[in-house]
Amino acid sequence: MKKSKFMGEFKKFITKGNVADMAVGIIIGGAFQKIVTSFVNDLVMPLVGLFTGGVNFNDQFAILRLPEGVTADQVTTLDIAKELGVTTLNYGSFITIVLDFLIIALTVFFLIRGINKIKESAEKMKKEEETAPAAPAAPTTKKCPFCCTEIAIEATRCPHCTSELEK
């Protein structure tokens, strides 16, 4: 019995629109993250590398500890450092990942900001519609051209003076 209740609750949860929207958002976010990573690694970081001496910025590191028998002159790249078992502080890679994050965060900020402006605009329009004066009601009476008494608009004869009225 507990199992069927759990499955029923899970089915109810998974078929809600919010879950499907969230799944689509996660998939698109993953694809967007790849685009941002490529942007940072292939466009931004090479430009940064030009300003730091023409080296690949992702490979920037500082040696923290050398294993016995290894000299600092032997460690020319991050890959060699890893092969030799050198303990390194990989600040170039870290800065690249921070840039990835900042670009994604900035993009999400602008996206949410745009969505909020659209919502605010829609709410403002809704309030204006609610507070706008109603259109004047169609007249329900007219004056008899003969005795000037108010009579129903559909009347074909004045009930006061019994005159026949034109339509």
Image (spheres, grey):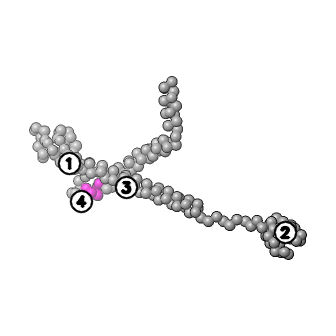
> Which is more foreground, mark 1 or mark 4?
1
Side of 136 relative to 3 (left or right): right
Estimate the x, y position of residue 31 in percent, counting from the top left. 41, 47
Q: Nearer the viewer, residue 132 or 39?
A: 132
26 drawn magenta: no
Q: Report x, y in % for residue 148.
A: 81, 74
Pick the front one: 79 or 104? 104
Report the predominant secondary structure element of the magenta stretch: helix
- The furthest residue to the top: 1
- Marks 1 and 3 sit apart, C-alpha to C-alpha, by 27 Å
Span shown in magenta: 45-50
Indicate the secondary structure of the residue bearing disc 2. Answer: loop
> Which mark sits nearer the N-terminus, 2 or 1?
1
Q: Give whichever of 127, 121 is nearer the camera.
A: 127
Judge whether 138 appears above or below 16 on screen. Answer: below
Q: Is residue 65 above or below residue 141?
A: above
Amino acid at pointer 2: Lys
First in residue order: circle 3 vs circle 4: 4
Residue at image location 68% in from the left, 67% down from the top: 136
Residue underneath mark 4: 51
Residue depicted at 56% across the width and 63% down the height: 128
Between disc 1 and disc 3, whose residue precedes?
Answer: 1
Q: Amino acid at mark 1?
A: Phe
Q: Which residue is mark 1?
A: 61
Dot 3 corresponds to which residue? 106
Q: Secondary structure at mark 1?
A: loop
- Location of the C terminus by quadrant is bottom right
Mark 3 vs mark 4: in front: 3
Q: Amino acid at mark 3?
A: Leu
Amino acid at the residue labelled 4: Phe
Q: Earlier in the sequence, mark 2 or mark 3?
A: 3
Could you say which disc has been placed on residue 167 in the image?
2
